[in-house]
Amino acid sequence: MIPLRDDAPRFTAPGITWFLIALNTLIFLYELSLPPHLREVFLRQFGVTPILFTHSGTVPWFTLISSMFLHGSWLHLISNMWVLYIFGDNVEDHLGHFRYLLFYFGCGIAASALQILLSANSRIPSVGASGAIAGVMGAYFLLFPAARVLTWVPFLVVFFLWLPAWIVLGYWFIVQFLSGAATSIGSTASTLHGGGIAFWAHVGGFAAGLLLAKLLPARHTHFRI
């Protein structure tokens, strides 16, 4: 299921969400400007490599933040930014701009932490904003469960459906959890030494989003007539 837009209203301009989308895009364009061998070095230097956290004397803590702004392809970037565009504005509207930014980074760090914990021997750097954006999705799931999301469902006769957010996001989370469990049970060479999707980062980010959305206070609002 691919979300296309939602119908939850917002009352403030999502400046932080727009800023994050712009910054991610600019950094990806910089990545593309690098020769292929330097691009690989760049991603390894600023991505989160689990084994460096678990078996290294010098832990690159800065990569917990820098990795959130790197992407491996146009599809990787566009899919992440599209989901952030759909769901980020309402979460930012609820939390307020500054708390939303702290929330975003907190979810991204939690996502990387779970991925490191469950892939401790991996030498492959994880990059992308998907862990932090999974947190946004978790918060939206909790805060706006009844909001409707126009969704592309390619395997149905009716391709476009308005579905409750809790169904769209809940389905996504279940898929990520089951996929993460499958890769952990499999523990093949490809999951330890090859590329792939960091499913546990998605699970960790979503769970962090649920928790932080519950703990962080909403922004101050005024009554509207």
Image (spheres, grey):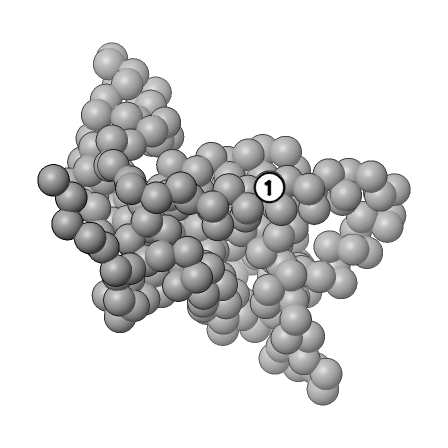
Residue at the (33%, 29%) spot, across then down? 5
The location of residue 151, given as percent across then percent down, is 30, 27
Residue at the (65%, 50%) spot, across then down? 70
Residue 38 visible in the snapshot: yes
Amino acid marked by disc 1: Ala
The location of residue 103, given as percent across then percent down, is 41, 63
Query: Under tag 1, what secondary structure?
Result: helix
Residue at the front extreme of this rendering: 225
Residue at the (20%, 53%) spot, across then down? 222
The location of residue 71, given as percent across then percent down, is 64, 46
Residue 199 visible in the snapshot: no
How dense is the environment of label 1, judged by Cα within 10 Å: few (below 14), some, or many (20 and up)? few
- Find disc 1 in the rendering and name its residue: 22
Depicted 63 relative to depicted 197: above or below = below
Left or right: 179 in relation to 61:
left
The location of residue 127, given as percent across then percent down, is 61, 54
